[in-house]
Image: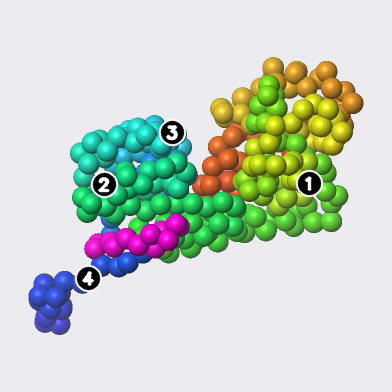
Amino acid sequence: MKRFLLLAFFLFLNPPSWAAIFEDEIGRKLEMKEPPRRMISIAPSVTETLFALGLGEKIVGVSSYCNFPAEALKKEKVGGYITPSLEKIISLRPDLVFQTADGDLKAFVKRLAGLGIPVYITNPRSLSETLKAILKIGGVTFSLPAAQALEESLRAKMMGVRDKIAGRPRLRVLHAMSVDPLISSGKGTFVHDLIVLAGGENIAADAKGKHPLFSMEEVIARDPQVIILSSMLSNEPMTAQKRWWERYREISAVRTGRIQVIQADLILRPSPRIVDGLVEVARAIHPEAFK
């Protein structure tokens, strides 16, 4: 008891210092004087990550696009991720704000920094970078053990996919974001990364730009064996879009009925759920491996 009182008295006179310097994903430095208690996430992917790390109670504000998990919908909204409300953010008294590198928000970030509000900017560009981003978010939120456990579980799921598709032929895959015009996903996108990791060959890999336009003549010439459509809603069948493709019976994917719908957030958003997206893409390409 005496030792406990002496230790308590020592800690009262010498409180532990939590101050630490972190570097975000675009190389900016930010100082955290203590673990954050009031966080705002303007990036939907970060919102999902924070909840997955068990930090939901510390989130006081999110963007209007943060729709997962369901608890995120109950949080205060601070505007879009490209047009957030500075006044709303300040009114919520955050001690850490998360933002994405997409969009030009230098003035916004500078204003918050000038008010003494740390801003952490995320910028993952692949599945492997998404896993690293989870660890870095775990670090800046002082929840690294939870982030490490999450990263390990996601990596194990990825290895499970790799083992299931090992030795299977690579099928030609088209990801169609829209059909009129027909926009696909090329190199430098999460979708391309997922297709390759899932055992497919992206027919847009050599096209110019991340989201190239395709003519139907080009699609027919490249003859995808699997077509993946992106749905903005969970469990949406996209019946009309599937029916649109039926006129092109010369395409292998249409002729064999290999047109699959996958929720867009699973394959376009660099959150922990992107590994679920990998599973869905692999299942679309090699359904026999998941029976």
Q: Which residue has dot 4 on it? A: 17
Q: Count neighbours of disc 4 (C-alpha within 10 A) and say few if under 14, some if 14 to 19, many if 20 or more.
A: few
> Dot 1: what SS?
strand
Q: Name the colouring of the figure.
A: rainbow
Tag 2 residue: 111
Magenta highlight range:
23-34
**Foreground of the two, 63 or 13:** 63
Above or below 131: residue 170? above
- Residue under circle 3? 65
Q: Nearer the viewer, residue 48 or 191?
A: 191
Q: In the image, is residue 156 above or below residue 109?
A: below
Q: Which mark is residue 57?
A: none
Do the residues under discs 3 and 2 have CB atoms within 8 angstroms? no
Residue lying at 84% horizontally and 51% vertically, measured from the top left: 168
> Horizontal and vertical percent for residue 229?
68, 31
Circle 2: residue type: Arg
Q: Could you tell me the amino acid type at mark 1?
A: Glu
Label 3, label 2: how far apart the Cα atoms are: 23 Å
Q: Amino acid at mark 4?
A: Ser
Amino acid marked by disc 3: Tyr
